[in-house]
Amino acid sequence: MRADPALVKRMARVIAFALLGAALAATAARIDDREADVPPTPTPRAVDPLDAELERCRKIARPEDVDEACRIVWAKVRQRFFTPDPAGETRP
């Protein structure tokens, strides 16, 4: 007894759609699991005393309004940025 070619084709199509549906369901479940993960809470950074002064200097629009305090703060930041850390630690 031979199987009907139309029946074999139909069964293959049903199986293919079932496998595709199972793969989509597994992917959706995996995505839901990832979204449920709580991101780690950021560690609070140490308060840098230069931050407030830098923020004030950033808001100055005209170059002629820049005062000596801003120039000093910018020089300190440049020095801190370009000077290698003797302990070999990375900075934030």
Image: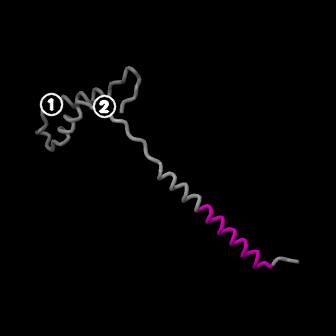
- Give SS at disc 1: helix
Q: Is 30 drawn above or below residue 19 in the view shown?
A: above
Q: Position of residue 11 (x, y in %)?
A: 73, 73
Asked if 15 appears above or below 87 in the picture, the reply is below
Please tell me the numbered disc located at residue 69.
1
Q: Residues within 10 Å of mark 1 (few under 14, many from 20)?
A: few
Q: Is residue 22 magenta?
A: yes
Way the structure is coloured = one colour
Amino acid type, callout 2:
Ala
Q: Is residue 61 magenta?
A: no
Quarter of the rendering containing residue 30: bottom right
Q: Is the magenta region chiefly helix, strand or loop?
A: helix
Identify which residue is drawn at 31% across, 31% down. 46
Q: Furthest residue to the right?
A: 1
Which of the two residues, 88 or 13, is positioned nearer the viewer here?
A: 13
In the rendered image, residue 44, in percent from the top left (x then y), is placed at 33, 35
Residue 37: mark in rendering:
none
**Mark number, residue 46:** 2
Disc 2 secondary structure class: loop
Q: Quadrant of the N terminus?
A: bottom right
Left or right: where 5 falls relative to 26? right
The magenta segment is 4-24
Where is residue 74 drawn, in percent x and y? 22, 32
State the separation of the CA atoms marked 2 and 1: 22 Å
Residue farthest top in this picture: 86
Q: Answer with left or right where residue 16 lies relative to residue 31.
A: right
Q: Nearer the viewer, mark 2 or mark 1?
A: 2
In which quarter of the view is residue 65 placed?
Answer: top left
Mark 2 or mark 1, which has the lower sequence index?
2
Instruction: Depth check: give the residue in front, 61 or 11.
Output: 11
